[in-house]
Image (cartoon, helix red, strand yellow):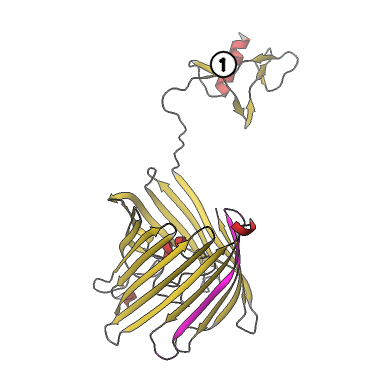
Amino acid sequence: MRKTLALASTLLVLGMGTSSMAKDATVLIGGVPVKQLYVDEEGRLYLTPGEGREPVKIEVPAAKGTPVVSKDKKIKIGGKAYIHWDYDMQNKSEHNTFKITRNYLEVRGYFNDKDYFRTTLDVKQTDTVDKGSYVARLKYAYVYLHDVLPYTGVELGMAHRPWIDWEEHHGWLHRDIEETLIENKSGAGLINSADLGVNFKGKYGIASWEFGVFNGEGYHETENSDHFGKSLEGRLSLNLFKGFTLSGHTVHSFDHKAGNYDRHIYHVHAVYNNPYFLVAGQYIWDKDNRYNSSDIKQKGYSINGDLKLKPFTGYPVGVLARYDHWDTGKGGDDTRKHFVYGVFYKLNKHVKLSLAHDRVIAGTNSESSDSSSLMAVAEVKW
């Protein structure tokens, strides 16, 4: 009787009920695997043998129907941060500072294996809050549906724009150090990476594409345009042979940021990437059709490369270099020249360390200024 009571107690502890028995099994008690239990004359259970204790056979019921615990991932949480130490080499004060230039907190809620809603928060330091507090702002908030058109899904909400995220994953792999030419205010400074709207993205064979309609102001400005006041944007990329991709990108932003002009961007890009090196180049034309004054035409190019030393040294270390040249169309000394070069080391899949020099030489009529910074950067992904 007491043995029966002990066995029933064991099954009750394991939450097994009294259904049909399966084979002997290992169970976890307090996180510890246990293959044998012991019972005394009072029916009390023990993990170790002792005087007056008898062994009890552990059995679990056979599984029936649908398992209670599913392996499907419904929620995915991750993040990314860029942690800097920047030393100002331009000014005699020799100013240096620790700072965070990106801190993403990303949450995805999956409806199934492919469709989800994504929310991403970022931080920005601002002088208007507590003399320099970091404040959280919304970077992405969109629903992704994978099969709305043939081979094409859609992002709806605060979504990716077609170009910048693509370049950061294929051509310029060091966003932790500097932005891409088209976004960087020391370069073209034409658009940013996210905006409210709808973005269709797909892939088939050697081709991938994105096209969408957006407010045009970007993720950190309010919609304030008259008339149609939207931005039509698209990208087409062709992987012509292994490692080589040729891309075209265009933007047509009407009443751009309520500035009384329409912005038209035409953009070509090529990248070749193999285990030993990466090299990429691009050219951008921009025409701003102003309503009440003369049009402005801007143009420029960027060349960047990575030399990957792991095949030669056995260590995940590399050398990076980039040069941007941007003509602002103002006339006179109106160009911006931007140099970035340095080394990087991939500590593991979560952390990359970089040391780089960032140098801007700005013309007197370029609406920018010279700068020179030495950067030590840790990129952290989790």
Residue 63 lies in magenta, yes or no?
no
Residue 216 quadrant:
bottom left
Location of residue 283 in the rendering, given as x and y in whole percent from the top left corner:
39, 74
In the drawing, does residue 286 fall left or right of residue 19? left
Highlighted magenta segment, given as a residue range: 331-356
- Residue 352 lies within the magenta run: yes
On the image, the x and y values in percent for residue 57 come to 61, 15
Which image quarter is the N terminus in? top right
Q: On the image, numbered disc 1 is attached to which residue?
A: 8
Q: Identify the amino acid type marked 1.
A: Ala
Residue reaching furthest bottom? 332
Q: Residue furthest right?
A: 51
Q: Is residue 188 visible?
A: no
Which residue is at a point 59% across and 57% down the rendered structure image? 311
- Residue 382: image location, x then y, percent: 55, 53
Is residue 173 placed above or below 289 in the rendered structure? Answer: above
Q: Nearer the viewer, residue 295 or 80?
A: 295
Q: Nearer the viewer, residue 110 or 324?
A: 324
Q: Is residue 375 left or right of residue 123?
A: right
Q: Residue at x 59, y 13 (%)?
A: 5
Residue 205, given in percent of the width and then of the height, sits at 34, 52
Q: Say above or below: 304 vs 65.
A: below
